[in-house]
Amino acid sequence: MTQHPSAEMPQAQAAAEGPRLGLPALTALVVGSMIGGGIFALPTNVAVSAAPGPMLIGWAITAVGMLALALVFQMLANRRPDLNTGIYAYAKAGFGNFMGFSSAWGYWISAFIGTVSYFVLMGSTIGQFIPAFGEGNTAAAIGFASALLWTIHALVLRGIRTAATLNMLTTIAKVVPLILFLILSVLAFRFGVFTADFWGQASPNLGSTLDQVKAMMMVTVWVFIGIEGASTYSSRAARRSDIGRGTVLGFLLTLFLLVGVNVLSMGIMSQQELAGLQDPSVAYVLEAVVGPWGAWLIRAGLLVSLLGAMLAWTLLCTEILYAAAKDKEMPRFLARENAYGVPSGALLATNLMVQLFLLLTYFNDSTYLTLLYLASATILLPYLFSAAYGLMVASRDHYASARERTRDQWTAGLAVLYALWLLYAAGPQYLLLSSLLYAPGALLFVKARREQGLPVFRPWELGLLSLLVLAALYAAYGLKQGFLTL
């Protein structure tokens, strides 16, 4: 029988470490991470890939797969109270030091690229009023984003609890206009518009039903990134049980809003019309229902939403680096804390990378959708590791009943299949591009191991690293030759 430390130990430690995050704050971290800019751009981002029929199939797959993943995070939070910081800790416990490091590194990359995409979307929204901001990647937009970035940096340095409370307030503020959108859109929904070209036969460029479902999967993954937010902050939770509850509650609320916005939009405007809208497309949909004030309301909600999402993702980026450094899988400078207990080293490293990528969007002309796909592809392996570890726990741990074990095995197995499906749906291009970002991380792993005087790689880990480096070199060659593009 596998024995694990009691859940009471983290709670006792939490009491000694000061104010903790309760269920509302943990749920807000999940919702605040998932509801950023993606939901406001969802109608167009899905419409360019799928008609209503394939869209519904894609959402059904996503709902089942992401629910399974949410339940895996809930199960692991309850059954493995000795493991904090979610994705990183689960990969390490199941597959060793290097895989744990890689999971933390990949998650961090996805999170800070996601943060960059929010800055770009904010700039493009402001650009609808101030032409100098363009699509969010002009000099004016990058300058504004940079100033905002370091303002958020200063805010987080004042304390995690303060930042989490502010995130909860912004989460409430951004959900209100979305609920109003749903109410007004229900009244304007026309079933004939929704079913007019249900399978996309009038738009042959969309491809087959399977092609359409695959194409929209990266968008649906993007809007659910952040589902692990409560697990990432498990070491700061007031009660262990709140981690799983916050994950499932946040998922269900977000799923309701996402599917509602997407489905109702396709009953107000046709797929072709939605595909031609600018972001934030939800603003134009509501404008078609109630007039110009609807667009203004959504744009205001988007700006609040983006501010909250930037804050939530800054917190998650920082925490995952800090957790790995504290566990000595990252270099020790990333474990530094300031007088407020904030991981200042990890925070600085995160925001320096955000700043670098903001500058790259100017020189590379990167758009929100490009960054969205890249961030989504990078998160897939960490999700797969967590789901696979959940299956290991369900198969090996002691259970009070066979029925409970079978339930957890089926749930984790479904989450594994969903993660593998996502890797297939992502396609080779973005997986190769993500290898360019994964490969350099090995240098930090080497530094951390040498700081402790430990052997760096086991033979099979060295083999995996070799494959990763080869993929990165091929991706670099592809970018140079032009058959891979950002």
Image (spheres, rainbow, N blue to C red):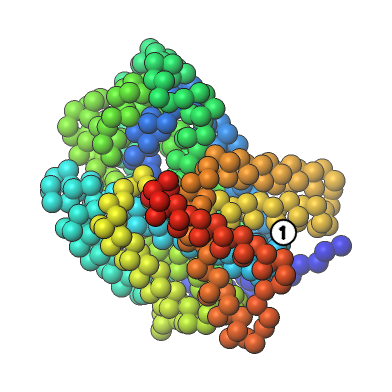
The answer to which image quadrant residue 78 occupies is bottom right
Front-most of 266 and 432? Answer: 432
Question: Residue 88, image x and y in percent?
Answer: 59, 64
For this view, does 394 lie left or right of residue 138? right
The answer to which image quadrant residue 264 occupies is top left
Circle 1: element type: helix
Give the tally of numbered discs.
Answer: 1
* Image quadrant in which the N terminus is located: bottom right
Question: Residue 30, image x and y in percent?
Answer: 48, 53
Instruction: Determine crowd level at label 1: few under 14, some 14-19, many 20+ residues with C-alpha closer than 10 A.
Output: many
Front-most of 340 and 456? Answer: 456
Residue lying at 64% horizontally and 69% vertically, measured from the top left:
98
Check disc 1 and give the amino acid type: Arg
Residue lying at 58% horizontally and 41% vertically, measured from the top left:
424
Q: Is residue 330 visible?
A: yes
For this view, does 368 lie left or right of residue 396? left
Front-most of 478 and 102? Answer: 478
For this view, does 244 lie left or right of residue 171? right
Question: Residue 386, image x and y in percent?
Answer: 64, 55
Residue lying at 50% horizontally and 68% vertically, measured from the top left:
440
Image height of 261 relative to 128, above or below: above
Residue lying at 81% horizontally and 58% vertically, measured from the top left:
397
- Give the residue pinned by disc 1: 79
